[in-house]
Image (tube, grey):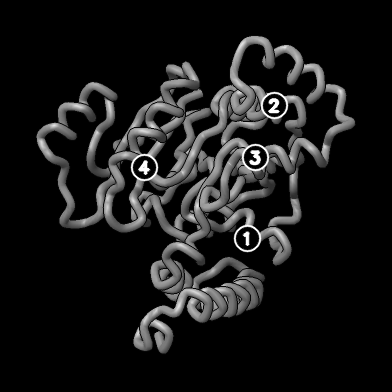
């Protein structure tokens, strides 16, 4: 299994947060991975940052993905986070279900991760696998790492065949935080886009859903509402596969309402609110 981790800043690259993400990747001790930084247009790295990128084996530009069996693309923002053991959990699922779209449950990276993990573990306090794994790691690592690894004891997944389901579209349609099979990527569509994910989903017969979070990511609706609005508007309803146009119309309306709610709370500019 090979994973192309494509890191795309939401606006301006946050080098400190990128460093944290790379440290989280390296801490996984997973070797079958390629790292790429896809900078926003007009942005470049300083010479010091370029040297550090080389030390990390971090390419800069558009990722050069060669389609292959059990090869996946994962788009993340520099502000997202990886939990311990994430790559190995994904590899186990990919081994059983190669070339399937994999939907990853996530935590919200805008909220303290420790609090979310503790709350999640408390909800499953009676699970014996969690208890056993927590006991095994507590003596060997700090409390935070022990809690994060304890999530592994709760991990499970399902095979979902109800592809045209409004209920699950928010899980399956997003530019970041999904494992996308390289064999099915559309080269003429931006890799980090709602349209890319939608194209894959339309051609899928099943989606693998990992139910316990292995990453923490930011919501595009909250962090970049106008970018998310643009992604929604770029969907061409006239060229969707059979049965998708009514579904996506409902989904877009839901997302438009969420964006308006966010705009009201964040007090964005009048021009942005009107847009």
Of pointers 3 and 1, the one earlier in the residue sequence: 1
Q: Quadrant of the C terminus?
A: bottom left
Question: Which residue is disc 4 drawn over?
Answer: 7
**Of helix, strand and loop, which one carries label 4?**
strand
Disc 3 to disc 1, how far (Cα)?
15 Å
Position of residue 79 measured from the top left corner of the image (x, y, whole percent): 42, 46
Position of residue 263 measured from the top left corner of the image (x, y, whole percent): 48, 78
Of pointers 3 and 2, the one earlier in the residue sequence: 2
Of pointers 2 and 4, the one earlier in the residue sequence: 4
At x 49%, y 72%, the residue is 239
Of pointers 1 and 2, the one earlier in the residue sequence: 2
Question: Which residue is disc 3 drawn over?
Answer: 213
Disc 3 to disc 4, how far (Cα)?
19 Å
- Is there a contact, CB below 8 Å, between mark 3 and mark 1? no
Position of residue 12 measured from the top left corner of the image (x, y, whole percent): 27, 54
**Of helix, strand and loop, which one carries label 2?**
helix
Question: Which residue is disc 2 drawn over?
Answer: 152
How many neighbours does mark 3 have within 10 angstroms: few (below 14), some (14-19), or many (20 or more)? many
Of pointers 1 and 4, the one earlier in the residue sequence: 4
How many neighbours does mark 1 have within 10 angstroms: few (below 14), some (14-19), or many (20 or more)? few
Kindly report which numbered mark, 3 or 1, lies closer to the viewer in this rendering: 3
How many neighbours does mark 4 have within 10 angstroms: few (below 14), some (14-19), or many (20 or more)? many
Pick the front one: 104 or 204: 104
Question: Which residue is disc 1 drawn over?
Answer: 170
Q: Is residue 39 left or right of residue 190?
A: left
Residue 253 image label: none
How many neighbours does mark 2 have within 10 angstroms: few (below 14), some (14-19), or many (20 or more)? many
- Is there a contact, CB below 8 Å, between mark 2 and mark 4? no
- Quarter of image, res 250: bottom right
At x 16%, y 56%, the residue is 42
Can residue 163 be seen by looking at this rendering?
Answer: yes
Disc 3 to disc 2, how far (Cα)?
9 Å
């Amino acid at each position: 299994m090979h994973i192309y981790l494509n890191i795309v800043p939401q606006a301006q690259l946050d080098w400190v947060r990128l460093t944290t993400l790379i440290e989280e990747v390296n801490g996984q001790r997973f070797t079958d991975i390629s790292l790429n930084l896809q900078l926003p247009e007009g942005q470049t790295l300083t010479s010091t940052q370029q040297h550090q990128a080389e030390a990390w084996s971090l390419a800069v530009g558009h990722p050069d993905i060669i389609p292959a069996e059990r090869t996946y693309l994962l788009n993340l923002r520099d502000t997202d986070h990886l939990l311990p053991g994430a790559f190995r959990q994904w590899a186990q699922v990919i081994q059983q279900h190669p070339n399937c779209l994999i939907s990853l449950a996530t935590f919200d990276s805008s909220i303290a991760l420790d609090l979310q993990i503790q709350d999640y573990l408390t909800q499953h306090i009676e699970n014996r696998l969690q208890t056993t794994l927590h006991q095994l790691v507590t003596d060997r690592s700090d409390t935070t790492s022990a809690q994060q690894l304890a999530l592994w004891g709760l991990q499970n997944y399902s095979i979902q065949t109800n592809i045209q389901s409004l209920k699950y579209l928010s899980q399956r349609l997003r530019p970041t935080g999904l494992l996308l099979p390289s064999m099915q990527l559309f080269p003429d569509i931006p890799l980090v886009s709602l349209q890319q994910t939608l194209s894959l989903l339309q051609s899928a017969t099943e989606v693998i859903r990992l139910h316990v979070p292995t990453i923490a990511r930011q919501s595009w609706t909250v962090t970049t509402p106008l970018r998310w609005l643009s992604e929604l508007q770029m969907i061409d309803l006239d060229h969707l596969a059979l049965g998708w146009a009514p579904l996506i119309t409902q989904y877009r309306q839901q997302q438009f309402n969420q964006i308006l709610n966010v705009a009201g709370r964040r007090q964005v500019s009048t021009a942005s609110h009107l847009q």
